[in-house]
Amino acid sequence: MTGQRNTSPEVAEAFHRLRTEVAQLFRRYEQTLLKLAKCDWLAYPDPATALQQITETAAETLSIARVGIWLYENDRQQIRCVDLYESDVARHSSGMVLLAADFPQYFAALEANRTIVAHKARSDPRTAEFTTSYLVPQGITSMLDATIRLGGETIGVVCHEHVGPERRWSVDEQVFAGSMADVASLAMDNWKRKQAEDERRALERKLQDAQRLESLGMLAGGIAHDFNNLLTAIGGNLSLAQQTLSPSSPAWPYLQHIHVASTLAADLTRHLLAYAGRGESSIERLDVNTVVSEITKLLRVSVPSGVTIGYDLAPETLIVEADPGQLHQVMMNLIVNAAEALGESEGSISISTKLLDADARYLIERFRVPELAEGHYVQVDVVDTGSGIDAETRDKIFDPFFSTKFRGRGLGLSVVYGIVRSHGGAIRVESEPGRGTHFTVIVPAVEGAEITQRHEAPLTLPWRGGGLVLVIDDEAVVREVAEEMLMRLGFRVLSRADGEAGVEAYRAHHRDVVGVLLDLTMPHWSGAKTLAQLRLAGCEAPVLLMSGYTERDVLSDIVDPYLADFLAKPFSFNELSQKLRELVVRKGEGSARTAGTDAGVRPLIKSSG
């Protein structure tokens, strides 16, 4: 017997309601996923905040108590909770760690399955391991976990945890859970790409900074070299003037002031060469109080008239071991920085020094440099009453190229920081808008030591020479002062502006040439090439090589069998005189060790003194 199945109106209505609810749930899942798919995850301030949005949305959509996102760590031997949302208290937490060794069945299931559907979590073999330690204490009865995959690899899991009576997860809910894992993967991929892009840009910035520093170093080296040529003219003419005048002359004190200023300038150019990688540090024992006094006297004319400079220098001698040029650079930058902070306004700059006895705790708390050893330090404080700086600027003030000035020099305080740290010290800045700025510098003190004395030869003519000296230098100011110095020593002088012309001059006057002053940095023919060509032309006379760079840089590739020597620019009359005499002595010793007297070598000394 056949016939139609009779369905009661109640059953039909219930079935219709169920289909409507399922359809509504499906549309709800679909709308949620569509909304999340369109979400700009990079608009969130950090990945953790983005993941919080995912856990909150999943908990609300599925009406469950707990949703967590866990990620693999330690070569996949553990997973860590990066966000757990508890909907009943609207709370986020993180940090819990689960070890694969403690839950082997669950970790194996994660590797083998896209989803873990545990209607009865406490008895399901894949999740039962959590029963005592996790499920029962949290009241969890059912779990729906979906693995997060990125680049074909499982990197974590989204855990949906139901609290209350056991829950049977529908197919739609399982699909939704998998989709939420995909959304988490999308968000994390976006942040991973952003991180990679940020790292690439940071690397590019570092490369650009390195290139700028390299270019700046080359520029600094070139400026220092050219400036040394000018200082040669200044210092050379100064020493000639001192040879001419008596110390009782009214002009003598002014010459002494010029001497101090030119010495400081030479120290600063040496520091520029060191910054350019073409210089050498010269560590000496210096009195910090003397350095402060020298620099402030030199800079006083550049400080606005409305600015007063006050001193509170320690009564005792404060000795440190430092490169003179670099220590002068530190003080100069700090004082210039203070003056610029005041601008044209009236105000004051206070400079104080003292001996500091500091323990390790004080050094760490005050200067935040853990490697500083406790002990005695020389402390220098430079305080201005300028406009001050805010916290953001204060945090960047020692960064390379950072400047608060529209046309700032940019590297000043970064160089100061590097110098102080290289000398085993530290620097601290304290400032607030409207309350001025306070720089504190500390450098290890040297106790019981004497200051390094710079001894200069007396301003006398120790000897006189004779014969023709060939001067080859592309700088006219250097040639002129060298000519005058040599003539005062009794020499005749022949000068040329380039190497090729110098070699031709030697060939024309080789019988009379008793010595050569040769610049090493020249266009067309370098000093090294010119020296080689002179030797090929038969020149056995002593050659004095001159350069504004250091001896190490310019002589490293020069091998000369005829006792070439080096004279650093700038040089004084006495330095040139002494160096020439040393060359003659060495040349004489070399001739004595060979087969008698070389008739082709003419002595530089005409009459000894």
Image: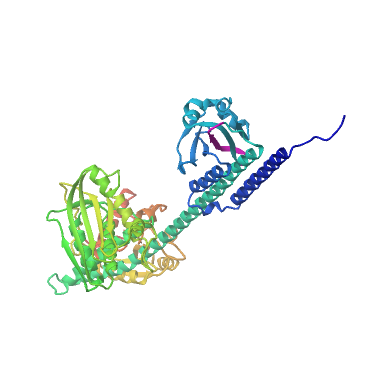
Visible residue check, residue 496: yes
Q: Is residue 469 left or right of residue 129?
A: left
Is 160 within the magenta? Answer: yes
Visible residue check, residue 568: no
Which corner quadrant holds the N terminus? top right
Is 104 within the magenta? Answer: no
Which corner quadrant holds the C terminus? bottom left
Q: In this view, does 550 lie to the left or right of 14?
A: left
Q: What is the span of residues highlighted in magenta in the rendered image?
A: 151-165
Q: Position of residue 15 (x, y in %)?
A: 70, 40
**How many numbered discs sit on the rendered protein?**
0
Q: In this view, does 321 lie to the left or right of 179?
A: left
**Residue drawn at the location 16% of the way across and 71% of the way down:** 252
Q: Where is residue 590 in the image (x, y as percent from the top left)?
A: 32, 51
Q: In this view, does 183 lie above or below 43?
A: above
Q: Is residue 504 above or below residue 599?
A: below
Residue lying furthest front in this view? 9
Quarter of the image holding residue 26?
top right
Observer-nearest residue: 498 or 405? 405
Picture colour scheme:
rainbow
Q: Is residue 608 above or below residue 424?
A: below
Observer-nearest residue: 75 or 592? 75
Observer-nearest residue: 159 or 548? 159
**Residue drawn at the location 53% of the way across and 53% of the way down:** 42
Identify the main secondary structure in magenta.
strand
Observer-nearest residue: 109 or 555? 109
Q: Is residue 314 above or below residue 162?
A: below
Q: Where is residue 19 in the image (x, y as percent from the top left)?
A: 69, 42
